[in-house]
Amino acid sequence: MEEPWDFEFFSRIADSCLSFLSEFVDDWLANDMRVSIFKILLGWLIVSLIAIHFAWKIYGNTVNDMYYRQGTGQNGGTPDTSPHLSGWESKAGDPPKTHRD
């Protein structure tokens, strides 16, 4: 009985990854326009992610406090019950409402 995860399967995956990486390195070292654009965009992405990280580190608590409901009650600042509504109770003497198809 042959095992589904044999050595040949892993060697094919390793060979394909190695060939992809070697092609990527060859393209990276070439002075092609598309490689230059890729380098610029990759640098912009890395700088943006670093800036977002530091901004969140500095201002994260302030932003969290702005959107966190403070106060007492069931959901922070909301009251437990509304004073002018009677709730789900119906008036005395009303027949109970049923759903009819």
Image (cartoon, rainbow, N blue to C red):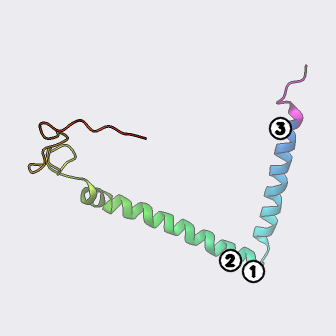
31 left or right of 53 in image = right
* Three-letter code for the amino acid on which mark 2 is drawn: Ile
Query: If you read the primary sequence from the N terminus, does the residue marked by circle 1 or circle 3 appear first?
Result: 3
Picture quarter with the C terminus: top left
Residue range of the region highlighted in magenta in the rendering: 1-8
Question: Dividing the picture into quarters, in which one does residue 88 lie?
Answer: top left
Question: Dividing the picture into quarters, in which one does residue 90 lie?
Answer: top left
Circles 1 and 3 in contact, beta carbons < 8 Å? no
Residue 86 point in image, percent of width and height: 12, 44
* Three-letter code for the amino acid on which mark 1 is drawn: Met
Q: Which numbered marker is on residue 37?
A: 2
Circles 2 and 3 in contact, beta carbons < 8 Å? no
Residue that carries the numbered disc 3 in the rendered image: 10
Residue 34 point in image, percent of width and height: 74, 76
12 left or right of 64 in image = right
Circles 2 and 1 in contact, beta carbons < 8 Å? yes
Q: Residue at x 52, y 69 (%)?
A: 47
Q: What separation in Å lies between label 2 and label 1 (alpha carbons)?
A: 6 Å
* Three-letter code for the amino acid on which mark 3 is drawn: Phe
Residue that extends furthest to the left in the rendered view of this protein: 83
For residue 1, above or below residue 61: above
Mark 2: which secondary structure? helix
Query: If you read the primary sequence from the N terminus, does the residue marked by circle 2 or circle 3 appear first?
Result: 3
Nearest the viewer among 5 and 90 is 90
Residue that carries the numbered disc 1 in the rendered image: 33
